[in-house]
Amino acid sequence: MGLKQVSLQDVIPLRHIVLRPGKGIETCYFEGDESSTTRHFAWIEREHVQSVATVMLSSREIEGVSVPYQLRGMATDPDLAGRGIGSHFLQALHEELDSSWWCNAREVAVRFYERNGLERIGEPFDIPGIGPHYVMVYKKTAGSE
C-alpha cells in the first residue's frame, strides 16, 4: 500500500516503542498533534504499520528562509530496521509535502536523514530525558525529486 494519511491514534504505538520506550504512553502525544493543520502519516504494507511520522505547520527561519513544516515523531518498526522502509517512507513524504521542511533529529538518526536529502544546521542541543539532537532541513528544489 505505501504512504497513507492516518489518525493520531495510528501513530502512537510506534512512537511509544521507538521514541519513548519505558516511558508512559502520555509522553507520546505532542503539542500540536490535534491541530487542524497537522497531518499524520504511515507507511503500511499488508495492513501492518511499518513507519510513522507527523507533519505540523510550524514555520522556522533557517538560513534566512522560512521553512513551513516540521516533521515530528518519525519512527520505524525496529523489527524491520535496515530494510529501507524508513527511506521509502521519507521519500514519499518529500513528494507528498512538495515543500521544504525541518525536524529535530536525534543524534543517532542524523546519518539516516543526511542519506535522505536533509542537511544538518547548527550545533547539537539536548532534549532533557531524550538526548542530543540536531536541527535538520529538507530543502525542496527543482532537482530534489
Image (cartoon, rainbow, N blue to C red):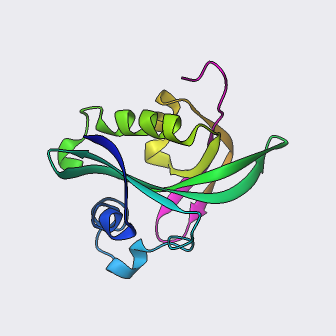
16 relative to 138, above or below: below
Q: Which of 141 and 25 is in front in this view?
A: 141
Q: Can residue 17 be seen in this view?
A: yes
113 relative to 47, above or below: above
Q: In which quarter of the image is residue 91?
A: top left
**Quadrant where the C terminus lies?**
top right
115 relative to 6, above or below: above
| Residue for point 47% across, 71% down | 129
Q: Nearer the viewer, residue 7 or 76?
A: 7
- Which residues fall within the magenta stretch? 126-145
| Residue for point 29% across, 60% down | 14
43 relative to 142, above or below: below
Q: Nearer the viewer, residue 134 or 1?
A: 1
Q: Quadrant of residue 132?
A: bottom right
Mark count: 0
The image position of residue 45, as x and y in percent, is: 20, 43
**Quadrant where the N terminus lies?**
top left
The image position of residue 4, as x and y in percent, is: 35, 48
The image position of residue 53, as x and y in percent, is: 42, 54
Q: Is residue 74 visible?
A: no
Q: Is residue 118 magenta?
A: no
Q: Which residue lies furthest to the right in this view?
A: 64
| Residue for point 36% across, 68% down | 20
Q: Which residue lies furthest to the top in this view?
A: 143
Quick check: 86 left or right of 40? left
| Residue for point 16% across, 51% down | 47
Quick check: 34 left or right of 136? left
Q: Nearer the viewer, residue 24 or 54?
A: 54
